[in-house]
Image (tube, rainbow, N blue to C red):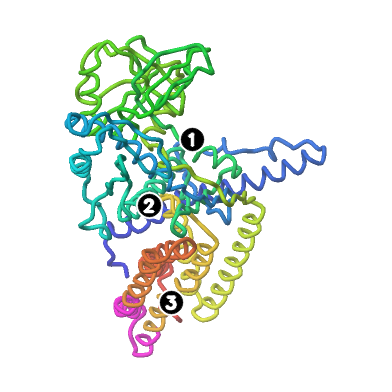
Amino acid sequence: MTDTPLWKRVLIWGLVALGITFALPNAYYQRVETHNDAVAAITAAGGVATPEQAADRALWPDWMPSALVPLGLDLRGGAHLLAEVKVADVYAARIDALWPDVRDALRDVRDQVGNVRRQPSVDGVLRVAISNPDGMAVALEKVRALATPVVSLTGMGQNDIEVTADGSDIVVQLSEAERIATDERTIQQSLEIIRRRVDEVGTREPTIQRQGSDRILIQVPGIGSAAELKSLIGTTAKLTFHPVVRSTQDAGADAGPRNILLPSMDEEGVYYILEQTPVVTGEELTNAQPAFDQNGRPAVEFQFDATGARRFGDYTANNIGKPFAIVLDEEVISAPVIQSHIPGGRGIITGQFSVEESTELAVLLRAGALPAEMTFLEERTVGPELGADSIRAGQMAAIVAGVLVAVYMVASYGIFGVFSVIALSINIALMFAIQSAIGATLTLPGIAGIVLTMGMAVDANVLIYERMREELRAGRSPLAAIHEGYDKALSAIIDSNVTGMLTALIMFFVGTGPVRGFAVTTSIGIITSMFTAVYVSRAIIAIYMGMAKPKSITV
């Protein structure tokens, strides 16, 4: 036992000390929260709390680790939303965006099709009237050339649009394969945007998952109310760039067909009439960062992707001297006059921003605009009271389990059982340390995983001690029995824990929600229990044998 290298002993106890250091903030802040609850109760009763009772987190040293185990919705409380995504809105937007391309395609054959006029759109269908029906075949050929293959496994070999003739009208609509692919993309994009928005504001471990064909479940721990979560998710930050028709101070001015009337964000009483179809949109942004303009005022720099950069560059090259409106959430931020060609797709948004507002705008633009409107079908605010009861019940279960395990181990193995209990305590501390460090959310199933780990953790010690008993009965010396017990039981310990780890990994990758929470806690517990049962308990026994130097041992 005493032949363990010094570096290994230092490493083992160093990891133990590091783990306890990272686990301590959870115990300290739990005590502080208890104090705060007591202070609140005293104050509510009309009393005055003592300075000792009013202690808070400021006493925790800044140089110490302060990460806590994040609690799930069932323990901490939070907000629950069930949203329905209006995917039909995306069809209309796609069709509306096709009109400039259809118009330009028919312009090349104007001598054969005559005048081209867009008819009112209904149910996501683009209707274009031509004055010369004899040129319908040419017109259909030109518009069908705009079709592109559907990007999905179910739509392979099909085009994204269907082009037909209806009298003197050309009818353009999305194909069924494209509608299915659009539905899938819209839901996935909505999931990603919601996740990025929630993560950008520092919320830990939200549950954001698809339910059915067009619904999204959103659960965020720590949010004060469902209304607060709706406000966060519902902020669209929709950025578009439109040609300016003219400006006016008449809030009821007639914008005309295919135009829109929008107010100015900074100029009170000023309105802009813009072309309804934007030149480029925020969907083509690849990056947005807070910055400062040439006058030192807060602004936002942006960068388009290749498609957006080409469109932006072509428009600025062909419209020098004309105003160009930057629109954010149905308000005109600014309408600068294009001074020169702007290649590369880079630009800057200026306005009367504060530093905080420019930073928030950059965050929302990076996250992107929600592709479709969402209707909230179900919303609940989960209070922390149930979570507090669950935590107390979990603590009681852990205490009872720990006491029973300790009594059994001490009764069965004497002083060596005490060593196992010490190692088990270190194991629990290491579990909380790892969860704090990696930010793994603790849920009710996670608490069940911790309690289960307490029972599983001593299995390795039982195997080791039973092997030691066999060696002692065979006449081995205490040091030899301990050495053989640990070495020869190691393979069985590894085998049993590998199978447990495989099960936990399968639950993590296949399961969702509570199942994954249980899997995370269990897998962490398997790793820490192997370390404490094999290495920490052996290090404790080495200290005991070195200090007590017993002539014989009883296991």
Secondary structure of residue under mark 1 = loop
* Numbered label attached to residue 448: none
At label 3, counting other C-alpha atoms closer than 10 Å, the crowd grade (few under 14, some 14-19, many 20 or more) is some
Secondary structure at numbered mark 2: helix
Residue 27 in the figure: left or right of residue 207: right
Labels 3 and 2 touching (C-beta < 8 A) = no
Q: What residue is at 46 percent from the left and 19 percent from the top?
A: 354
- Which region shows up in magenta? 469-493
Q: CA distance from mark 2 to mark 1?
A: 21 Å
Going 43% across and 47% down the picture, which residue do you hit?
88
3 or 1: mark nearer the eye: 1
The residue indicated by pointer 1 is 235
Q: State the image quarter where residue 45 is shown.
A: top right
Q: Which mark is residue 183?
A: 2
Indicate the position of residue 156 as horizontal and vertical percent values.
22, 58
What amino acid is found at the position of numbered circle 1 in the picture? Thr
The one nearer the camera, 109 or 217, is 109
Can residue 341 be seen?
yes
Instruction: State yes or no: residue 397 in magenta.
Output: no
Give, as a three-letter code, the residue at label 2: Asp
N-terminal-most mark, 2 or 1:
2
Q: Position of residue 404 (x, y in %)?
A: 58, 74
Q: Which mark is first along the chain, 2 or 3? A: 2
Q: Do the residues bearing badges 2 and 1 touch, measured as CB atoms within 8 Å? A: no
- Is 483 a magenta residue? yes
At 48% from the left and 35% from the top, the residue drawn is 235
Residue 308, position in %: x, y?
Answer: 25, 31
Neighbour class for label 1 at 10 Å: few (<14), some, many (≥20)? Answer: few
- Dominant SS of magenta comes to helix
The residue that disc 3 covers is 459
